[in-house]
Image (cartoon, rainbow, N blue to C red):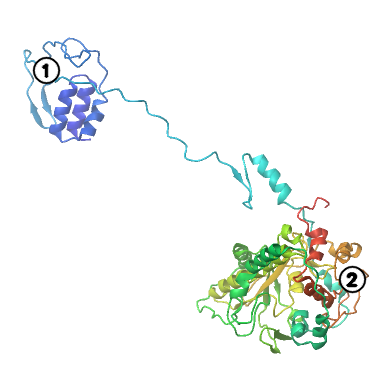
Amino acid sequence: MDMGTIELHDLIKQGRISRRDLLRYAALLGLSAGAAEALAACAPQVTPTAGMPTYLSGGEAMPTRVWTPAVQGHVSGMDVDAPTPDWTPPPEPTITPPPPQPLSTATPIMWEPAQWICPQGDARFDTQEALVAHVLEKHARKVPGARRVSQPTYAQFITGLIERFDQRNHVFSRTVWDKNYQQELTKVVPRTPRESPEQMLEGMAFVAGSIYTDDAAGSLNPNYRGYSGHLQNTGGMYDWNDPVSANQYPVSDLAQMSLRIKQVARTFGADLVGITRLDPRWVYSHYFDRESGAYGKLDVPYPFAIVMAIEMDWTEIATSPRFGASAITAHAYSRMGEISSKLAKYIRTLGYPAVPSGNDSTQSIPLAIDAGLGELGRLGLLLTPEFGGRQRICKVYTGLPLVPDQPIDFGMQRYCETCFVCAKNCPAKAIRSEERTTQVTSISNRTGLLRWPVNVSECYKFWRANGMDCSNCIRACPWSLQNRGWL
């Protein structure tokens, strides 16, 4: 504010200048109309007196007498002559008041009242208390206490030399080359469908959509239909030939790097993550790609495995052995390919070798146990404190220096010794109800372990008869339940 404006401001406050003269002087000073109005707002409210024009209703001016302002001297560089006592201001123009304006209304609210949203996005609630009740009922689960141990719990049941397993002896591989097993499969009688033709169509569509990512991009082999994981030299999400960046990220704190790897894996979609040194006993001695028939010795030259578990939704697993369970399993396989390939790409971009793996190259369950995700159950699958048997496993093998996790013990060996629910609910009678044994059921089992070997040959026969895979053992296991009020 310059000196002229300050002087005007003082004259206004003292009541020594009229609003009309104020506006005239403001114009001479070059002030904007808005600035002049702001100054006028500072003028004291003066009750009209003699010498000050007032107005009757309708805008007619009342008579005025001579008004002598006490303004004299210099105002902001202008020479202002003091008016003589007989000077009379010209009459004010007739002013017609504007028509009355309606009162302004409050701005309307542009949204409905705020609500609490479920973390799963499946419901909204008016109060926080209602949200908490919903989460506890539908999504929360009790988990058992688990302690870290120096050796995985399967170690106590190793009875002899464990030789590396040949992927060619996997039950799915045997459907391609094993003539005797192929002959057994021809005798399988398909079961009468439980679904109507419309339900069959919808169910098959659910499975097709669920496996689509893996089917379309898991491998570029034209015969690939998902589920297998890495195939030799074919490209796709499970490709092992992507180059490693020459610009290497320095790793000075291995523990911090390990924590970051787990954070990134969870960001990409993993539900559980653990790290282990790659035990060569769990690497297949030979690979076998049933889509192409490729067969040969296998080497996985990486010191670490990052093992990730993908949860399968309880609501769909509970429909086993029908389409819902088959679809949610397929969905987990698609997520396996996406998550493992993203994490491998992340590590390669850091300048370290890394390759993704699904149902290939190594035995996933013992690696997951070594990485501290869970224990081996009677049903022959990984059981975790969080999901029981409701997960699928993928891995990333890497040369990135990391800190391995310790295995855990949460009591599953003792529990499975007295629980027979999975065996009783297996439609193929493929799960052993008796004590552990070292006897194998077929070449699809491996020797050197005292355990409950699953008769996977009979298991797969039921799949063929059922027209889709089966998850009855997972559904029946008490640890797979969403609500674990019994704990």
Q: Is residue 122 above or below residue 297?
A: above
Which residue is under mark 2? 432
* Closer to the camera in the image, 460 or 252: 460
Please tell me how crowded label 1 is: few (under 14), some (14-19), or many (20+) other residues with Cα within 10 Å: few
Q: Eyeballing the image, is 346 above or below 70?
A: below
Real-space Cα separation, disc 1 to disc 2, in angstroms = 113 Å
Would you say 201 lies left or right of 157 here? left
The residue depicted at 64 percent of the width and 65 percent of the height is: 262
* 185, above or below 379, in the image: below
- Say which residue label 1 marks: 91
Bin the neighbour count of mark 2 within 10 Å (Cα to Cα): few under 14, some 14-19, many 20 and up.
many
* Residue 126: mark in rendering: none
Q: Please, what is the three-letter code of the amino acid marked with disc 2?
A: Arg
> Does the rendering let one see residue 61?
yes
Task: From the top left corner, tell me how far across and down residue 441 is, in percent.
Answer: 87, 79
Please state if 220 lies on the left or on the right of 111 as rendered. Answer: right
In the picture provided, is 222 more to the left or to the right than 475?
Answer: left
Q: Residue furthest bottom?
A: 296
Q: Are marks 1 and 2 in contact (CB under 8 Å)?
A: no
